[in-house]
């Protein structure tokens, strides 16, 4: 049985007790320990900076040219915290409760409670760093309500919250780089994990500019490498987001948890054509003022402003009178798909719904709307070529976030001792659906306030063998990396990496996207290995391994997606229930809502790697709910 | 929407690495949808090159939403291309005309050496931040966030400056390859906030010193940087920085 190391005691005391009981590392000793951090998003930057401040020797890696460019930079809407500055009934317990419920009861209570507890410290920390959060005229911090919450607990910096939080963490990171406590390796990709005597002791990297393959040894390895939404090719994620670090760690013994839990975000700019390279999110905050609708009649091709009020279907307000346009993401996405499936979708492709600001502009004035959402409206206009102040936006759901990821225990440690996983890369806090503004919160919670304690607990309680990069495990891992690179360069086939990636994306989107069924999933399990086999025979990778070679980088990532996709689909197939973002058509209520099966599926599905092309083994962590009563989620 | 298609020719700077000499190569592309982004046009050329077994054009990009600051090239001599206040990734083909020849070059500045094709090394920016672009607080032990009241006006001004994405367009467009707009944006962001006060003099001194050491040029008021900045960072920040610097000397 797997032990999630959940501390005993009442939920509100678990974290304090655990911190007290964890071993400490004496400040003078910390500099004897080296910690590798892969990733410089909110999770990786905050962890790197904090650990370095504490005295550990830190080596940090990212594939972008600067740590400031990690994908976290793109987050728009905001970050949650249970500050209750609004006096509107928020509390740590309510944030905990909302997150468990929003996740459709598939997250671990203890982790989520800790997240809600430390959320309040995050805002303090960011303000102290100089993060320019939005303020009210009296000088206090402003809040908005976001993503289905009935309290205003979301802090924001215009439409660029992720940018400002990341620049805050990045400035803390750069301060330590300047002080010589962090060795920073930008434009460097981790390509393997090195495990020595059962413990994570290092990584193998490729310098993306020179192509040099390098070995790095450490006492612990932290992965903060983000989510795998780009498995679908089209997503709101930055182009470089990938599963490579997680997947290669998975092959070295780290189990993958709930890989089928993908969040499809309801408000993105629709796809415009075959060459489309990514999808753009229009922040969910827009649903606070925008009203979602489609024509009542099937195939109504009139311009939106020509369709009279009485012939519009504000379907979210109709179906969910109490939450209306603010229902959680999974619910809103499925509802959009449903009206498009009925033939009531709008735009050229019929795969879009309207998000209309006419009423809000009437009520608040154009200026107020511009102040709140100006940058988003500009972005929309730039991409769609239409003015959203005058005509409704067209939006459609798109892959956005991955709740699944490497399994971690309460200490954020994976099934490989010494390998910790932070931020979106782990599976831990959002169950089957993440609430808006909670990913930023989790990334910073993990990095600033959780890992400093739990890593100390591990290091303080472990006896380390003296290991150098001369150890055979390093040589073996390096040889693996080299042989994969050589293989990719030697194929010289006829199909581009992108064309494989797009095909994989279509398979996943059609069969493992907003709605899934047994037949589609089973067919995908047939198709994915075929596509993978073709990839390894027919992919084109030009250039050499000793230089900047973006095709080679992409090929390695797509090779991993092609393996990972199978586990994702398998997970979706074995989870014979619907919950959160995982909607199995076979399991729905009469009103087409997700129907959970708590009796049989109240668990985390964990997948263990068994070797190339072998079926993975399924393990289960039973979820125990001692505080929250499981109910059917209702947003009516 | 009114999407249509156009035919254009891309004239792109190709350079294998820092040591070799580069040259322009010409790539005609037909039936480009005007809804396509500029980077998608480059993707299209790259797919064609790969099909012919040729090396694709190397260019930096990641978010493709105008926020990470990773993309950037000179397009017809303008940093990030013809549209005002947008990055290259947010530039769309509807900004060009049928029959256009579009010249695409990397950022050119002493402090940003070329790595390959359109990819340059902008790590000098990180070094400037590491030398002082922060508030010296460590994690933990900080006051409650609402303990420091900040007038909305100041928070807004700080945010205006903090919106910089560090893309380097300001340096690339400046005849002197000056980094003044970038550095001043950070200095001005922190100097508008109470948290930034304690270290303001030291910060300005150190960041400006590092900027000079790294080979960036001086500001002689060409204002090109402000004109091309995708985030509309204002020239006033440079005045603020100069004031901070002057006061740091006393
Ligand atoms: C458009 C958009 C808007 C969003 N808005 C919000 C919001 O308003 N509120 C909210 O809470 N959440 C939001 N999210 C989600 C949130 O931004 C992410 O979940 C979160 O930022 C992830 O942070 P992270 O630190 O885990 O990873 P990331 O920020 O993705 O960072 C990953 C890091 O890992 C590095 N890396 C990856 N693989 C390797 C490798 N093999 N080798 C070396 N380095 C590697 C990368 O270089 C990068 O530094 C949004 C997401 C998107 C896409
Ligand atoms: S790719 Fe991120 S700003 Fe252009």
Image (spheres, rainbow, N blue to C red):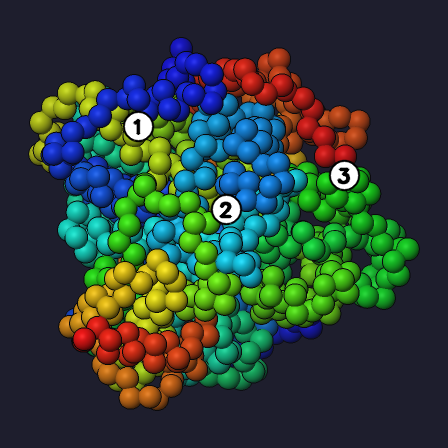
Tell me if residue A348 can be seen: no
Indicate the secondary structure of the residue bearing disc 2: strand
Residue that mark 2 sits on: A79
Quadrant assignment for the C terminus of chain A: top right
**In this rendering, position of residue A12 left or right of residue B134:** right
Q: Is residue A341 above or below residue B30?
A: above
Q: Are marks 1 and 3 in contact (CB under 8 Å)?
A: no
Q: Nearer the viewer, residue A268 or B14?
A: A268
Locate residue A208: give its quadrant: bottom left
Query: Label 2, label 3: how many angstroms apart (C-alpha)?
Result: 24 Å
Both labels 2 and 3 in a single chain? yes
**In this rendering, position of residue A168 left or right of residue B122:** right
Task: Decide which of tag 2 and tag 3 comes sooner along the chain.
Answer: 2
Q: Nearer the viewer, residue B10 or B194?
A: B194
Please report, as a chain letter, where disc 1 is located.
A
Callout 3 crowding tier (Cα within 10 Å): few <14, some 14–19, many ≥20 = some
Quadrant assignment for the N terminus of chain A: top left
Residue that mark 1 sits on: A454
Image x and y of residue A127, in percent: 40, 52
Image x and y of residue A542, in percent: 32, 57
Callout 2 crowding tier (Cα within 10 Å): few <14, some 14–19, many ≥20 = many
Task: Decide which of tag 1 and tag 3 comes sooner along the chain.
Answer: 3
User: Which residue appears farthest toward the top when viewing the image?
Assistant: A1
Query: Label 2, label 1: how many angstroms apart (C-alpha)?
Result: 23 Å
Query: Label 1, label 3: how many angstroms apart (C-alpha)?
Result: 41 Å
Residue that mark 3 sits on: A322
Please report, as a chain letter, where disc 3 is located.
A
Please report, as a chain letter, where disc 2 is located.
A
Q: Is residue A321 above or below residue B40?
A: above
Name the residue: 51% across, 63% down. B152
Name the residue: 81% across, 66% down. A305
**In this rendering, position of residue A511 left or right of residue A121:** right
């Amino acid at each position: 049985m797997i032990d999630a190391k959940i501390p005993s005691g009442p939920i509100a005391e678990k974290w304090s007790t655990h911190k007290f009981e964890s071993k400490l590392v004496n400040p003078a000793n910390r500099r004897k320990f080296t910690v590798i951090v892969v990733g410089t998003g909110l999770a990786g930057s905050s962890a790197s900076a904090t650990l370095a401040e504490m005295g550990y020797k830190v080596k940090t890696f990212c594939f972008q040219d600067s740590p400031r460019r990690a994908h976290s930079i793109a987050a728009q809407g905001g970050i949650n915290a249970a500050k209750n500055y609004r006096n509107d009934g928020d509390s740590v317990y309510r944030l905990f409760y909302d997150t468990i419920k929003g996740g459709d009861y598939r997250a671990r209570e203890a982790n989520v409670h800790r997240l809600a507890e430390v959320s309040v410290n995050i805002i303090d920390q960011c303000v102290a760093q100089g993060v320019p959060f939005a303020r009210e005229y009296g000088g206090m911090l402003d809040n908005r309500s976001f993503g289905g919450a009935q309290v205003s607990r979301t802090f924001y910096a215009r439409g660029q919250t992720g940018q400002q939080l990341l620049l805050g963490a990045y400035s803390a990171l750069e301060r330590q780089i300047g002080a010589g406590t962090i060795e920073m390796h930008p434009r460097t990709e981790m390509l393997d994990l090195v495990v020595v005597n059962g413990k994570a002791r290092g990584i193998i990297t490729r310098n993306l500019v020179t192509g040099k393959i390098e070995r790095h040894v450490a006492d612990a390895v932290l992965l903060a490498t983000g989510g795998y939404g780009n498995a679908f090719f089209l997503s709101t994620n930055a182009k470089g987001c990938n599963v490579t670090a997680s997947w290669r760690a998975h092959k070295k013994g780290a189990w993958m948890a709930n890989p089928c839990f993908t969040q499809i975000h309801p408000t993105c700019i629709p796809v415009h054509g075959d060459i489309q390279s990514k999808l753009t999110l229009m922040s969910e905050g827009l649903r606070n003022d925008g009203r979602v609708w489609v024509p009542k009649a099937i195939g109504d091709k009139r311009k939106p402003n020509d369709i009279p009020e009485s012939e519009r279907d504000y379907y979210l307000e109709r179906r969910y009178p109490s939450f209306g346009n603010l229902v959680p993401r999974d619910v809103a996405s499925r509802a959009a798909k449903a009206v498009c499936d009925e033939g009531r979708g709008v735009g050229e492709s019929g795969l879009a719904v309207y998000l209309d600001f006419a009423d809000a502009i009437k009520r608040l004035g154009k200026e107020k709307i511009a102040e709140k959402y100006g940058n988003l409206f500009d972005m929309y206009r730039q991409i769609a070529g239409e003015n959203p102040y005058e005509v409704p936006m067209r939006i459609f759901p798109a892959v956005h976030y991955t709740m699944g990821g490497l399994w971690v225990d309460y200490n954020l440690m994976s099934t490989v001792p010494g390998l910790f996983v932070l931020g979106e890369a782990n599976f831990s806090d959002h169950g089957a659906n993440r609430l808006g503004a909670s990913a930023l919160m989790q990334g910073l919670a993990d990095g600033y306030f959780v890992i400093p304690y739990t890593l100390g607990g591990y290091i303080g309680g472990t006896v380390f063998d003296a290991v150098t990069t001369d150890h055979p495990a390093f040589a073996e891992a390096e040889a693996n990396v080299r042989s994969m690179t050589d293989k990719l360069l030697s194929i010289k086939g006829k199909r581009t990496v992108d064309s494989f990636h797009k095909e994989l994306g279509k398979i996943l989107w059609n069969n493992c996207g907003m709605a899934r069924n047994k037949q589609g999933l089973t067919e995908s399990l047939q198709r994915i290995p075929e596509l993978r086999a073709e990839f390894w025979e027919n992919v084109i990778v030009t250039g050499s391994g000793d230089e900047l070679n973006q095709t080679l980088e992409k090929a390695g990532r797509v090779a991993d997606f092609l393996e990972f996709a199978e586990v994702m689909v398998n997970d979706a197939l074995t989870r014979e229930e619907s919950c959160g973002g995982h909607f199995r058509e076979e399991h729905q209520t009469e009103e087409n809502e997700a129907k959970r099966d708590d009796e049989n599926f109240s668990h985390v599905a964990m997948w263990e790697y068994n070797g190339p092309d072998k079926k993975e083994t399924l393990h289960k962590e039973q979820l125990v709910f001692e505080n929250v009563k499981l109910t059917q989620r209702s947003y009516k | 929407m009114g999407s249509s298609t156009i035919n254009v020719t891309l004239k792109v700077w190709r350079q294998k690495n820092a040591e070799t000499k580069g040259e322009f190569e010409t790539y005609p592309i037909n039936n480009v949808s005007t809804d396509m982004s500029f980077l998608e046009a480059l993707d299209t050329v790259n797919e064609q090159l790969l099909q012919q077994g040729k090396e694709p054009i190397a260019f930096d990009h990641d978010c493709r939403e105008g926020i990470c600051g990773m993309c950037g090239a000179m397009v017809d001599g303008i940093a990030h291309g013809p549209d005002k206040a947008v990055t290259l990734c947010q530039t769309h083909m509807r900004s060009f005309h049928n029959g256009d020849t579009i010249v695409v070059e990397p950022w050119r500045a002493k402090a940003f050496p070329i790595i390959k094709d359109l990819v340059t090394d902008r790590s000098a920016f990180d070094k400037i931040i590491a030398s002082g672009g922060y508030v010296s607080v460590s994690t933990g032990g900080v006051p409650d966030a609402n303990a420091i009241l900040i007038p909305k006006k100041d928070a807004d001004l700080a945010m205006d400056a903090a919106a910089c994405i560090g893309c380097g367009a300001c340096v690339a467009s400046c005849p002197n390859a000056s980094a003044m707009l970038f550095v001043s944006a950070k200095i001005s962001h922190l100097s508008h906030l109470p948290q930034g006060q304690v270290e303001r003099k030291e910060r300005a001194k150190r960041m400006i010193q590092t900027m000079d050491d790294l080979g960036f040029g001086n500001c002689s008021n060409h204002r090109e940087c402000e004109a091309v900045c995708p985030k509309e960072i204002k020239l006033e920040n440079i005045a603020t920085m100069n004031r901070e610097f002057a006061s740091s000397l006393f």
